[in-house]
Every structure is written in C-alpha cells, then in structure tokens.
Image (tube, grey):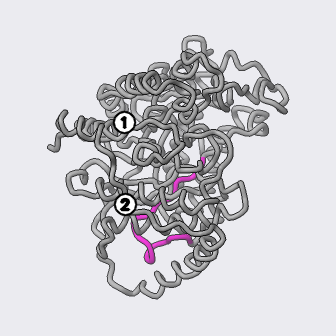
Amino acid sequence: MITFSKLALSLLAVTPFVLAELEPASPIHQVHRSRAHKLRTAESTAAANSTITKRAPALRFPFGSTKVRGVNLGGWLVLEPWITPSLFDNTGNSAIVDEFTFGQLQDYNTAHAKLVAHWDTWITESDFAAIAAAGLNHVRIPIGYWAFDISAGEPYHQGQYPYLFKAVQWARNHGIKVLIDLHGAPGSQNGFDNSGQRGSATWHTNSQNVARTNAVIKTLAAEFSKSEYADTVTSIAPLNEPAGFVGGTMLDVVRQYWYDSYGNIRYPFGSSTQGDLLEVIHDAFQPLNSWSGFMKYPNFEGVAMDTVSHSDIVTSAKFSMTWEQHIQTACNFGINTIGSYSSNNIWTFVGEWTTAPYDCAKYLNGRGIGARYDGTFAGSSRKGDCTPFTGNRNKFSNEYKNFMRQYYEAQVSAFERGGSGWFYWTWKAEDADEWSYQAGLAGGWIPTNPSDRRFPNICG
C-alpha cells in the first residue's frame, strides 16, 4: 500500500511545480491555421496507421463492462459560491464572486488562511468512507490550473495539490477509484464561476492559454500514470465544460485540444507506448451526434465522452416542465440519445447531474444573482416559489422527496442503460440539500445502494 508521508506533503505544499515546457506562443491567427491543419490530418494519420497492431495495456477500470457510479467532490479544491456560500458571505464583500476575486479582493494572509481551513475540513477521509458505504465506485475531483501555474497578475492561491494526493490515498483506503478533472483553465473555458473566474470565456482566444493548459495536463499525466497509482487513479478529464456555444473558433480549439490531450494522457512522458489512463473528453455543450466518429476506436484507444445531463442545464424552459416531464426527458436522454451515440462511438458518462429540478439554490447562478424559477434572475418570469425546494431537507415535503427519488432512479437507470455510468453533482453542499448526495442518503431520496429500486419500471 502506498502512503504519503507528512514530510512529502509538506514539501509539496511549498515547492514550486515544474510544469512541462510551454510551446512557444504565436499569433492567434497562425495558431488557428495550424489547428485547422492538425484537425484535418489527425484522423487521417490515425486511419493510415489503423492496421498497426495495438499495444495498449488494459485500462485501470473495466469501463464498459462495469458501470461507473460516482460522485463529484465539488466546491473543495475549486471554490463555488453556491456550494459553500458562507465562505463568500463571511468576507463581507459582495464583489467576491469566484476564486479569482477571493484572492484579489482580500488580504493575502486572510484569504489563504480561509482556504487552508476549507481544504482541511470540507472533504476528509470520513467522506470517502461514506461514499464507499453508499455503493459508489468513483469520485470525480475538480482542480484548477492555478494549483500548478500562476502567472503575473493572477491572484489565485496555491496549496490544493497536496490535498489531491491525500484524496488519492483516502480513495485507495476505501476501494474508491479517482477521475481527476481539470475544472478551470487560463482565460476561463466557459466564463462560469466554477472555472475560477466568472465572466467571459477567453481561453480559446490566446495560444498561451492553451499551451499552459496542456502543460498542466502533462504534469498530471506524468505523475498519475505511475504504477503506484494504478489501483486508484483511472482517468483524467483534461478540461471541464468548454463553452462550445460561444461560437467563433472555440470548437476548433477544443477539438484540437482533445487531440493534444490524447497524446499527453495516453502517451505520458512523450513515450511511444500507450499508458493505461483513460482520457475523458467533453461534449462542449454540443449535441452528442455532432461528435459522431470523433476519436473512435480503433484509431484511438482509451477515450470516453462526458456529456451534459438535462438535469444539470439551467434554462427557463426547463422550469415550465412538470415533474413527470423531467423524468421522461431523463429517460429519453439516457436510453435513446446517449444509447445511440455510445453504441456507435465511445464510452459515454454523464459527468454531472442532480435530483434538483429547479435553480433555487442560493448563488446557483452566481453570487448576487437570483433564480429563474422564482423570477429573481434578470429577464426571467416567475414560475413559482423557491422556498419549498431548496435548503435544509427537513423542510422538504414527502411529495418533493418522493419525486426526487423517482428522478434519481430514472437517471441512474437511463444513464446505465444507454451509457457507461455517471457522476452525481455533488457530494455535499452547505445549504442546498436537493443537490447533495450526502443529504439525499440521509433524507431517503437517494438509496444506500444505487441498484435499489422503488420504481423499477420508471423508464419502461
């Protein structure tokens, strides 16, 4: 059994990370021309070599034959105001809306002490014991690029990486597998607060942003491809939720980045021999069928798709649906949409989903921003009162909890029938029990065994 000594962790906490050397920056128009060329040639080159005998070792988890049943450790190594609103409210500064401003608008020592206290307490080994007891086999751990690389003018704090090592050890202790997810990239890949900086998605507009992100993935792959992690770390997701909907060059940059990450993750250390880590790409909020044929076997090995569940997409139209329509939509998405894509392409997971039908949780849409459901979000029209549907589970009606149980069973059933598994978002939240797997277990709308069914035919 591998252990991490306190000395090693303390050294890691203070030692600057040596990232893989960045590719030299070049004007962005030149980058896009070269990307277009690479996009045209990557698949054709792979196809030309498809007759070569494959030598990829077995992956670290039997993806495909065993369903991934996982939960996200959200709000821990990447802050999210809605998961831990007290961390933001206690600053006394309403302009602090993400991890960037958390560092920018506070005294350094004050902010850092708060972060360390949060990292020490939000997730501990007892959480891993509870996750294992709930019948789950994976955790997805978000981490930001700033844990490895901070450039001039970026007010982030470091110190997260030692906790990732602790998490891997805790996971090993309890038989849990780990997916490491790069949740934030330089320039922000989506403009969401969970990317580190709320605002505009500019990651794709600067070649240096992409080069820095590639360097982080090389660092992660070089470390966690080591044999000492083979029993625990199964996969790396090189970028969470890139915003394909922003248009422009984003999708071209994302597609090339998935190719680059394939080399970085599947061929760590620049070797000519494939490793045994799975690369988990993302659909970039595009229809799954738009990715048909992309990075398929046999030209590519060890690649899976992370898709976005309807339950995790916040739109006004969603909140006009009845509970039964939510359930029917989940069944159709999992069985038909995911099923059609995954059966002809690559393993497909739902990386984030929830039992919450509405956007009522405090700060869910951002600190200082209201909810669409109750009309407090600018430009939205009121559908109903948020009070009964968010907060502490003790105030939830039996009817609401019964719906969430049905919604849970529908999504689990559909995602496993159509795809290769799922990661619930999220394990815990301070004041949004409808989003918390931990609270759902305590409240009874999430079973202690994911295979248990009160509604065995909910998806037909």
In the rendering, which numbered label is found on residue 20?
2
Q: What residue type is disc 2 on?
A: Ala
Residue occupied by mark 1 = 159
Q: Residue 308: where, in percent of width, then height?
A: 60, 48
Q: Residues within 10 Å of mark 2 (few under 14, many from 20)?
A: some
Q: Which residues are magenta?
A: 294-308
Q: Is residue 361 magenta?
A: no
In the drawing, does residue 25 fall left or right of residue 386? Answer: left
Q: Residue 228: where, in percent of width, then height?
A: 20, 52
Q: Quadrant of residue 193?
A: top right
Quadrant occupied by the C terminus = top right
Q: Residue 152: where, in percent of width, then height?
A: 50, 46
Residue at the front extreme of this rendering: 152
Q: Quadrant of residue 57?
A: bottom left
Q: Assign a secondary structure to mark 2.
A: loop
Q: What residue type is disc 1 on?
A: Gly
Kindly report the secondary structure that dominates the magenta region of the rendered protein.
Answer: loop
